[in-house]
Image (tube, rainbow, N blue to C red):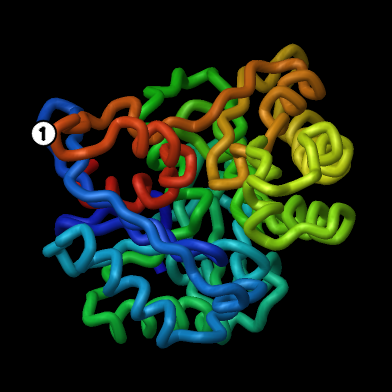
Amino acid sequence: MLSKFTKSKKSLVGLDIGSSRIKAVEVKSSGKGRYELVNIGQVNLLADTIVDGQIIDGNHVSDCINRIFEEQTIKADQIATSISGHAVIVKKISVPAMSNEELREQINWEAEQHIPFDINDVNLDYHIVDGEIGGNVDVLLVACKKDMVSQLTQVISQAGKTPSVVDVDAFALQNAYEINYQPQPDQAVMLLNVGASVMNISIVRGETPVFTRDVSMGGNQYTDMLQKKLNLSFEQAEMLKRGVVPEECAVTLADAEPLLQSVTEMLAAEVQRTLDFFYNQTLSEGEHLDRMLVAGGSSKVNGLIPYLAERFQIPVEPFNPFRNISINSKKFDENYIHEFAPDMAVAVGLALRSAS
């Protein structure tokens, strides 16, 4: 497994395999820190294809990967993909200062003390985050269950592609953030990626990850709530949660608003727990969170971003992973790019593994 700190020399297609959709992005470097969009595409997965991170129907996932590549005429076959959820543990630990060789030898022992999985069942990666402070160094330790990585690489290989990088969603998101937002060293930002079934919460200061947490909730909770309480179909609920009233539907936005807010409040409570830890454990007196960037398909749930801004009293805005990426308007539909930009943040971060 490769972490956020690993780059690839090969041209990569960023492939974000979510529980409801697969998103693909290809970019290239145009020099001097600038980038250009080469390809972009997505396809919906059938319901229950991926459940709780487990790939139930690998053939369908492989077929969908092939469909994206064929529809978008993507020629590159080297893939960077990522994983999140309960199968991934990201933990910052403090260890005595030692050489890189000594740390490599000791990392398995350190992992056994901090990772709630059998060490033989996980892939490990680590990176020294901060330099020596008082005889210790801070190390970011990442563990991912091997069977989950194997599932991902198998469906990619079955589609005739080469899985070159397996990343973590939160790190891919941070990669897109660094390249598109040029963060200041003292700026603390929350990156919130709200997918269909998993929400990635990551706090970074400058380019340093401070805290990362995955929560098993997301857009599906909104859809389920609307379906059950308003007797809607899945498609109707999906439209309504984004503020669009389906045709021939007696339900109004006013009917949906309190239901959507009830789920948003649960989501915000998880964000609050993360912030409480952040403020209590990692910030010096007087420091604060500067802003929040919200990515993922469920970032477009009606009222979510204004609610977060009001509750946490900080600037909250949609994450735009194309701020520093040139887009040829003759090749790409600008309305499509604008509409789906937050959805593509992880895929962009993965694609930038080779371009950055």
Identify the residue shown where x is 29% and y is 65%.
Answer: 68
Q: Quadrant of the C terminus?
A: top left
Front-most of residues 122 and 47: 47
Q: Label 1 amino acid?
A: Ser
In this orientation, does residue 32 appear?
yes
| Circle 1 SS class | strand
Give the x, y percent position of residue 183: 44, 23
Q: Is residue 184 above or below residue 8?
A: above
Q: Is residue 118 above or below residue 259?
A: below
Q: Is residue 47 above or below residue 275?
A: below
Identify the residue shown where x is 49% and y is 32%.
Answer: 319
Give the x, y percent position of residue 114: 69, 65
Q: Is residue 14 left or right of residue 98?
A: left
Q: Which image quarter: residue 47? A: bottom right
Front-most of residues 323 and 41: 41
Q: Which image quarter: residue 136? A: top right
Identify the residue shown where x is 36% and y is 73%.
Answer: 64
Q: Is residue 263 left or right of residue 332?
A: right
Most distant residue in the front direction: 248
Identify the residue shown where x is 81% and y is 23%.
Answer: 311
Give the x, y percent position of residue 289: 67, 22
Q: Which residue is mark 1?
A: 30
Give the x, y percent position of residue 227: 79, 58
Most distant residue in the top direction: 286
Q: Quadrant of the N terminus?
A: bottom left
